[in-house]
Image: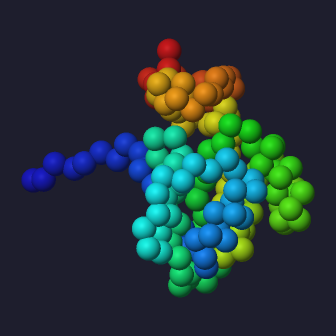
């Protein structure tokens, strides 16, 4: 019998976009971007100790329910920037939008979810964020926070 590997996180997410330059400019209107590097038809944007890979050349139809969740330090700042840029943002607590290439993105606030970064990663990012009581309870239930 083979041993099964344990999934412990996501290293990166890859999104197909029409143009790398246009995607960097578009996402840069709503998020502070740090470009890790570029290679041909790919660009790599740091997300702390993870990254977002942008791949030029959209081959898939627009996403209906398929999406990826992006963790930010201030979800409401992203909502305001999206609305200011006339990006359609449904009302309610959740924050989901489509980029110009049909990628559906859900934005979540770091403080409100069980996802956590190591203290040294938060320090390197210059962040001091306190989890909500609900997020701390979820972490405690998993033995991640005391």
Q: Does residue 66 appear left or right of residue 143 in this picture?
A: right
Position of residue 85 relative to residue 138, above or below, is below
Question: Is 21 drawn above or below residue 94 in the view shown?
Answer: below
Q: Quadrant of residue 77?
A: top right
Residue 104 in view of the camera: no
Q: How is the image coloured?
A: rainbow
Indicate the position of residue 82 as horizontal and vertical percent values: 82, 57
* Vertical relation: 113 (above or below) 96: above
| In this picture, residue 114 sits left or right of residue 28 | left
For the point 64% across and 23% down, the residue is 128
x 53%, y 76%: residue: 56
Q: From this viewpoint, is residue 77 visible? A: yes
Q: Residue at x 46, y 57 (%)?
A: 37
Which residue sits at x=58%, y=59%? Answer: 68
Of residue 65 and residue 72, the one placed in the foreground of this image is: 72
134 and 53: which one is in front? 53
Given residues 136 and 102, the one toward you in this image is 102
Name the outermost residue toward the left: 1
* Drawn side of residue 117 relative to residue 108, left or right: left
Give coordinates of residue 19: x percent, y percent.
61, 76
Please count the marks in the image. 0
Give coordinates of residue 54: x percent, y percent. 53, 66
- The image shows residue 11, relative to residue 22, as above or below, that is above
- Which one is in front, 43 or 4? 43
Q: Quadrant of residue 72?
A: top right
Instruction: Give the side of residue 49 with respect to residue 83, left or right.
Output: left
Coordinates of residue 21 in the picture (x, y in percent): 62, 70
């Amino acid at each position: 019998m083979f041993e099964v590997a344990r999934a412990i996180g996501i290293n990166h997410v890859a999104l197909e976009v029409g143009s790398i330059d246009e995607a960097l400019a578009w996402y840069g209107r709503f998020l502070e971007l740090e470009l890790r590097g570029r290679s041909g038809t790919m660009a790599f944007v740091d997300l702390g100790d993870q990254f977002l890979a942008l791949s030029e050349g959209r081959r898939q139809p627009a996403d209906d329910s398929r999406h990826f969740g992006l963790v930010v330090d201030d979800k409401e700042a992203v909502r305001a920037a999206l609305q200011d840029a006339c990006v359609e943002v449904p009302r309610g607590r959740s924050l989901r939008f489509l980029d110009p290439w049909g990628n559906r993105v859900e934005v979540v606030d770091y403080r409100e979810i069980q996802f956590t970064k190591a203290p040294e990663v938060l320090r390197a990012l210059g962040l001091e964020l306190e989890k909500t009581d609900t997020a701390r309870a979820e972490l405690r239930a998993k033995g991640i926070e005391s």
